[in-house]
Amino acid sequence: MVRGRHFPASYEELPPSETCYATLVYGPAHIACLAATVGAVLRDVDPARPRVAVTRRISDDTRSILTAANDAGPLWTLMEGSEWTECCKHTGRKADLWRIHRCGLVAFLDADALPIASPSLPAAITSLWAMAAALPPSADVIGALHDRFMRFTSCFNSGLMLLRPSADRYEAYRSLVVRRRARSRPCTHTTAHARAPAFT
């Protein structure tokens, strides 16, 4: 509560939205500090759009960092990550992004993917959501692939991506991660992906 205004205390209280931002916060508090910086920039440039941080077993201090609020609301609304992701590397944990069903389209940023607060950022944000609106029904995600993964057509690990949450996609992603983890294979897979332009 900030100056008489009510903001969602958790993801479960978040009203349905056509679009939102998301990040992941696992591990030590310095990751939360990075995510808080990303959230502050997004809140300043696009305050009306929800921001969801998927977390797992975070401390009270980390929670306080992520939910610091002003008149525009908290930096992030928190969503509890799935238990099975605790023993996954970062790629597997991203499966939880497809559980953000209260948002029709999600723009995911890694906690260390900081949008630069510059005069050009509002235009970049507008372009990002224009790209999201143009995402075809046949593709559930678009993102920038890391160059070292490009030789593997089935690998996808993006620090910035647009995605359409889906219970079916989440379950397929979870099952694949679990199977590949059992075989010690490092990458995860999506059915449709493409390079995205730089977000600066």
Image (spheres, grey):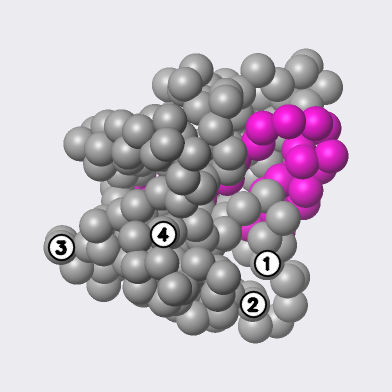
Disc 3 to disc 4, how far (Cα)?
18 Å
The residue nearer to you, when weighing 175 against 60, is 175
Residue 39 magenta: yes
Q: Earlier in the sequence, mark 4 or mark 2?
A: 4
Can the viewer see residue 49 in this picture? no
**Dot 3 lies on which element?**
loop
Residue 155: mark: 4
- Residue type at mark 4 is Cys
Q: Residue at x 41, y 67 (%)?
A: 152
Whether tag 3 and tag 4 are in contact, CB under 8 A, the answer is no
Per the image, the residue denoted by label 2 is 200
Per the image, the residue denoted by label 3 is 138
Per the image, the residue denoted by label 1 is 115
Whether tag 2 and tag 3 are in contact, CB under 8 A, the answer is no
Local packing at callout 3 (Cα closer than 10 Å; few below 14, some 14-19, many 20+) is: few
Residue 75 magenta: no
Residue 80: mark: none
Q: Earlier in the sequence, mark 1 or mark 2?
A: 1
Image vertical order of residue 11 relative to residue 31, above or below: above
Disc 1 to disc 2, how far (Cα)?
6 Å
Q: Earlier in the sequence, mark 1 or mark 3?
A: 1
Residue 120 appears in which quarter of the rendering?
A: bottom right
Q: Residue at x 78, y 27 (%)?
A: 62
Whether tag 1 and tag 2 are in contact, CB under 8 A, the answer is yes
Local packing at callout 4 (Cα closer than 10 Å; few below 14, some 14-19, many 20+) is: some
Return the x and y of residue 159 as percentages of the image width and height: 57, 59
- Residue type at mark 3 is Ser
Instruction: Give the residues drawn in magenta, as a range.
Output: 16-43
Disc 4 to disc 1, how far (Cα)?
25 Å
